[in-house]
Image (cartoon, rainbow, N blue to C red):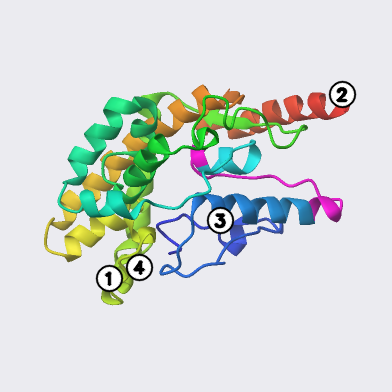
Amino acid sequence: MDVGTAKVRPEESGGIPHHLIDILDPVDAFSVSDYQRRVRMKIAELHGRGVLPVVVGGSGLYVQSALYDYRFAGAGRDPKRDAESADVPTVDLYEALRKRDPARADVIGSSNRRRILRMLDMLDSANPDAIDSENGKIPYYPDLILIGLQMPRAMLAERIASRVERMMKDGLLDEVRALHDRNVRTQAVQAIGYRELYRHFDGELDLPTAVEQIKIHSRQYAKRQMTWFKNRMAVDWFTVDPDDFSATVHAVFDVLDGRLEKR
């Protein structure tokens, strides 16, 4: 899953070690709590070697779970809910979640049935730490600095479209075809870029429509993620000028230098 995940290539790494890449197979299960545990273990290892880690990318929930005091309910999914909802369309479950918690519904999206059911379980959980209003608000690391990059929405939409086209040229279709031929039907292939092309190979969408759906879903996801980061984490935001990205880099380093000097 190299192309669809925009996995950093060796020539792009600039000699900087990258961690937690190629640690799973597409058929492996990997939850947010699994991610939290693995990231914190890696950070502890790097701290032990005197290395300052930089955590890059990831959805808002995953980043928050690793870098903030984010706690999970101890219980797993409720089998009773699974049985009761077996014949309930995903869209109806999503509307039920949206009525109870619109903010989390927007982040999860309307197609992720597993996460919708999990959130409904958490809302019914007797463990208030699972979703209480203070959960995930306190940084897990006291010296945490969060840097966010943003750009005007129209410009972002153009770059998303060009990125999707570039991914198609780089072999995304063949990558997804190989997974489809293996009959991989796990959560991994529900990611944007994979699920749309799966629908193409399943005969539900022609290829141009599938590609357009990837662009639309990517724009929608970017909007949801921006809302999550701005509402839930203390991020220093920088507006990117693609024609002068070095200026953005210098501005970020000025802030980092100032923060580090005070420590």
Of callouts 3 and 4, the N-terminal one:
3
Q: For the stretch drawn in magenta, what is the main secondary structure?
A: loop
Q: Amino acid at mark 3?
A: Asp
Q: Earlier in the sequence, mark 1 or mark 3?
A: 3
Q: Is residue 59 magenta?
A: yes
> Dot 4 lies on which element?
helix
Please state if 81 lies on the left or on the right of 261 as rendered: left
Would you say 163 lies left or right of 215 here? Answer: right
Task: Return the x and y of residue 30 as percentages of the image width and height.
Answer: 49, 59
The numbered dot on residue 175 is: 4
Q: Would you say residue 222 is visible in this rendering?
A: no
* Magenta-tinted stretch: 46-61
Q: What secondary structure is found at the residue carrying circle 1?
A: helix
Q: Name the N-terminal-most of marks 1 and 2.
A: 1
As drawn, the label of residue 34 is 3
- Asked if one can make out residue 158 in the rendered structure from this viewpoint, the answer is yes
